Image: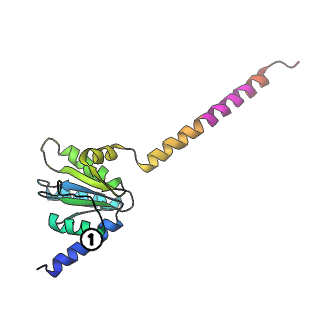
Amino acid sequence: MATQAKKDQVALLTKKIKDAQSFVLIDYQGIAVNEETELRRKMKESGAEYLIAKNRLFKIALKEAGVEESFDDVLEGTTAFAFGFTDPVAPAKIAFELSKAKEKEKIFKIKGGYLTGKKVQEADVKALALLPSREQLLSMVLNAMLGPVRKLAYAVVAISDKKEGAPAA
């Protein structure tokens, strides 16, 4: 029989799954407490949330949230969950930073994730983490759009300068 605490945990996880734009599943075994505290702080600053829950309760919450994909292959062992509420890529970026730092020690590994209604594999999460931020992408697009205008302005100024320097007829 399920205890009230477990029911509350499932309800909380279900709400987070429904509210999140994405989530990342992480094997957190071997990470130090101070590193985990720093990870939680970074997640919170970026509008994400990091928590640890039992795999079985998370599976129940997935069903209750209406997620049809099976996460049985990644919900084994120690699993932490990073939910992205405002920026769907933020949890992947932050988790990837720490997993990259811990690569030699073979601890803190990304297991997979969920983005825009679809399950994504570990490699996909890492690819997302390597993408530039939204602000950087917007900056790149604006720069590309302003390039031709900038060149036209330089050409007009150069022609104007050339005409001013020409002898009067």
- Where does residue 108 sit, x and y in percent of width and height? 17, 51
Residue 3 occupies which quadrant of the picture? bottom left
- Where does residue 146 sit, x and y in percent of width and height? 59, 39
- Where does residue 82 sit, x and y in percent of width and height? 26, 59
Which sits in the foreground, 44 or 129? Answer: 129
- In percent of the image, x 66 and y 32: which residue is there? 152
The kind of residue on which mark 1 rests is Glu
Which sits in the foreground, 112 or 81? Answer: 112
Q: How is the image coloured?
A: rainbow
Residue 56 occupies which quadrant of the picture? bottom left
The magenta stretch spans residue 63: no
The magenta stretch spans residue 152: yes
Is the N terminus in the top left, top right, bottom left or bottom right quadrant? bottom left
- Of helix, strand and loop, which one carries label 1? helix
Q: To which residue does mark 1 refer?
A: 64
> Magenta residues?
148-159
